[in-house]
Image: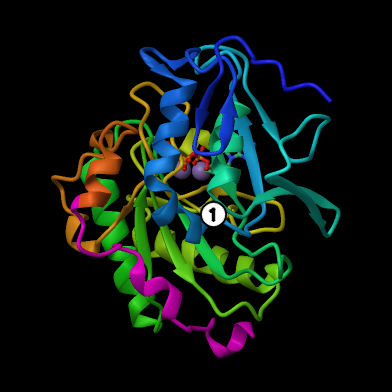
């Protein structure tokens, strides 16, 4: 038995070997930087990522190069990344910091998660409302939409949590006791989106047709289905600026909110300064869909 050959350009981050560590994934931001980012935020990020079916967006040549979604394993995949299937849908999953670092090693910049756990993949543990502004919609309008949606959910007895996507919109996440199947959860989400459109058709649209979206916000309920994903909290985005999908406290959801401020360079310090995880309440909330959906 001989010692492993050192790989040129490889660095250790935590216990994980990062090859081509100085390869730029974003201009001026390397694979090693991505790995160091995950190491700093792992403790906060893992509760929302570990044990959840994932699809990985890999960008081996960085954000300007070819990219592809990966949902099943391949030869040479690091052992910290696991494979699974549910209802014919393949998925990957990770458990720990080594899993996050393995994603960085694979140049998997974005982690996208199901709305269910890998342990119980047929019974969603959350609803995700993906607010997608059409052309000509100011971000302050997306903020207003998120606040309205929160209020309407509260009126139905459901607490929700907001995060930036690292892109143009916001996500609202509604934790659920995992008891109803995908069909019921999707029916509820669709009904909710359609009701918003019916009440304010000048502001909202519930159908995913690009043509009618101009000037309105798509309430995308299609994130709720088996195999459908939404970007995970704390995942970086393969977009300019290395923005990060960032969980917010509701008091941060104001017209002054600027999602571009949350990047792999700024989020670790944000977490160190926070006294409390803005989504800390999610773990202890036990809430159910209205009776007619159970
Ligand atoms: P933004 O705020 O800019 O809309 P987003 O992450 O919400 O950012 P969307 O285009 O609205 O982007 O997509 C919502 C989610 O749907 C994504 O986070 C991703 O998980 C999933 N998704 C979108 N496109 C694809 C795709 N081509 N393949 C797999 N999943 C996708
Ligand atoms: Mn979106
Ligand atoms: Mn969308």
Q: Residue 103: in sight, yes or no?
A: yes
The quadrant the C terminus occupies is: bottom right
Q: Residues within 10 Å of mark 1 (few under 14, many from 20)?
A: many
- Farthest front residue in view: 1
Q: How is the image coloured?
A: rainbow
For image coordinates 29% across by 42% down, the residue present is 268
Against 10, residue 189 (above or below) is below
Against 34, residue 193 (above or below) is below
**Foreground: 26 or 216?**
26
Q: Is residue 252 left or right of residue 9?
A: left
Q: Say which residue label 1 marks.
A: 49
What number of labels is visible? 1
**Foreground: 7 or 255?**
7
Picture quarter containing residue 156? bottom left
Look at the numbered disc 1 and give the secondary structure of its residue: helix
Q: Residue 208: in sight, yes or no?
A: no
Q: Is mark 1 within 8 Å of ligand 1?
A: no
For image coordinates 53% across by 83% down, the residue present is 288
Against 47, residue 22 (above or below) is above
Span of residues in magenta? 273-294
Residue 287 lies within the magenta run: yes
Whole-percent x, y for residue 271 in the image: 27, 50
Whole-percent x, y for residue 76 in the image: 79, 29
Whole-percent x, y for residue 283 in the image: 44, 74
Q: Is residue 243 left or right of residue 93?
A: left
**Foreground: 16 or 206?**
16
Whole-percent x, y for residue 155 in the image: 34, 81
Q: Is residue 48 left or right of residue 94?
A: left
**Foreground: 121 or 61?**
61
Against 218, residue 86 (above or below) is below
């Amino acid at each position: 038995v001989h010692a492993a050959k050192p790989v040129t350009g490889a660095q250790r981050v935590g216990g994980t070997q990062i090859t081509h560590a100085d390869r730029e994934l974003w201009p001026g931001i390397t694979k090693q930087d991505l790995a160091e980012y995950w190491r700093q935020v792992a403790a906060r990020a893992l509760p929302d990522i570990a044990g959840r079916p994932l699809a990985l967006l890999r960008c081996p040549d960085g954000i300007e190069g070819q990219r592809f979604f990966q949902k099943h394993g391949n030869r040479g995949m690091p052992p910290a990344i696991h494979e699974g299937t549910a209802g014919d849908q393949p998925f990957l999953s990770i458990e720990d910091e080594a899993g996050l670092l393995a994603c960085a090693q694979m140049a998997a910049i974005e982690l996208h998660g199901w709305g269910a756990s890998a342990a119980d993949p047929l019974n969603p543990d959350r609803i995700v409302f993906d607010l997608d502004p059409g052309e000509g919609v100011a971000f302050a309008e997306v903020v207003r939409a998120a606040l309205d949606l929160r209020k309407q959910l509260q009126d139905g007895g459901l607490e929700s949590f907001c995060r930036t996507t690292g892109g143009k919109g916001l996500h609202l996440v509604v934790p659920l006791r995992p008891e109803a199947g995908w069909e019921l959860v999707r029916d509820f989400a669709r009904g909710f989106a359609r009701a918003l459109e019916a009440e304010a058709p000048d502001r909202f649209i519930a159908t995913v047709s690009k043509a009618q979206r101009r000037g309105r916000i798509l309430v995308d309920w299609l994130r709720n289905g088996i195999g459908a994903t939404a970007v995970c909290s704390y995942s970086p985005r393969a977009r300019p600026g290395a923005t990060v999908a960032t969980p917010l406290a509701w008091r941060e959801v104001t017209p002054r909110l600027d999602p571009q401020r949350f990047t792999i360079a700024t989020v670790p310090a944000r977490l160190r300064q926070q006294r409390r995880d803005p989504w800390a309440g999610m773990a202890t909330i036990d809430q159910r869909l209205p009776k007619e959906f159970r």
